[in-house]
Amino acid sequence: MSSRQLHLNFLLAYLPSQTPPGLKDLRWEDLLSIRGNGKGERKPYDRIYDYAPYNDLGNLDKDSDLARLVLAVLHFNHLPVAFTGIRIDPCSESRIEKPHPVYIPRDETFEEITATLSSSDISFKCFSDIDKLYSDGVLLKDEEHNDEAENMFLSKIMKQVLSVGEKLLKYEIPTIIKRDRFAWLRDNEFSRQALVGVNPVNIEILKEFPILSKLDHAVYGPPELAITKELIEQELNGMSVEEVFIPICL
């Protein structure tokens, strides 16, 4: 499958041994396309995730004194970095200078709308700069990006958003920051967000205690979890499991 051909999106993840027969050939062709052949120049439409040495650290095209060693990992198996010891290496590549973009696989690049709304000149130097998104807002006055947006095929609503000139864009303060400005730094909030994950719909309310696993006991062992009553009550600020559990069930 060439880079210019149809890009297949597999909605379900299959192990190689469990891939349906009808998808095996397509999956193999897609894998070959992603691997690349290690030759030629990367194009913006390519989806190649290939191993490559750091062979553009120097700039031989500008001056021979700017030559740098080629850094490569032996066999790509996380061994220590190996140095070639060659000052002028024929395997070196020319450096990509601005305004030419560095190659990024197509799946990893910003969509045109996202890139237009983003500005490479805006950076967060400290956490208080992030707070200013909610307290002070952001002044939209990037005429260059607005001109780019005019040349793009955007919906009417998006064009209205991008044509606000120097109007102020102000974000609503997230609920968690309203309660505690540094809540996101604390362990309990980190664990809560880790538990929610990318699909909070999968979380179910606890209806039975002690907690018993529904996994196959023969494969995963006893159904009793390591989360005991004592461990839970350490986080309940003096309340018992019974006091908390009964109202939830009701």
Image (tube, helix red, strand yellow):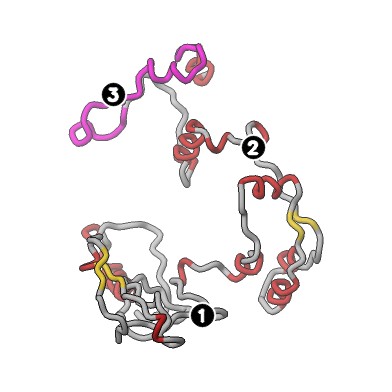
Q: Check if mark 1's residue and mark 3's residue have beta carbons within 8 Å.
A: no
Tell me the crowding category of disc 2: few under 14, some 14 to 19, or many 20 or more residues within 10 angstroms, Cα based.
Answer: few
Examine the structure image and report whether residue 154 is included in the region drawn in magenta. no
Mark 3 residue type: Glu
Task: Residue 199: tell me if it is visible.
Answer: yes
In percent of width and height, residue 83 lies at 26, 71
Q: Which mark is residue 224?
A: 3
Mark 2 residue type: Ile
Vertical comparison of 238 with 29: above or below? above
* Camera-nearest label, 1 or 2: 1
- Where are the magenta residues, as a range? 213-242
In percent of width and height, residue 133 lies at 70, 50
Helix, strand, or loop for circle 3?
loop
Residue at the extreme front of the image, as rendered: 65
Cα separation, mark 1 vs mark 3, equals 59 Å
What residue appears at the point 50 percent right and 11 percent down from the top-left corner? 238
Q: Which residue is mark 1?
A: 97
Helix, strand, or loop for circle 1?
loop
What residue appears at the point 37 percent right and 82 percent down from the top-left corner? 93
* Dominant secondary-structure state across the stretch colored magenta: loop
In the picture, measured across the screen, residue 96 lies left or right of residue 13, that is right
Q: Which residue is mark 2?
A: 177
Q: Quadrant of residue 15?
A: bottom left
Vertical comparison of 210 with 64: above or below? above
* Camera-nearest label, 1 or 3: 1
In the picture, measured across the screen, residue 168 lies left or right of residue 31, that is right
Q: Earlier in the sequence, mark 1 or mark 3?
A: 1
Q: Earlier in the sequence, mark 1 or mark 2?
A: 1
- Check the picture and name the quadrant holding the N terminus: bottom left
In the picture, measured across the screen, residue 79 lies left or right of residue 129, that is left
Cα separation, mark 1 vs mark 2, equals 41 Å
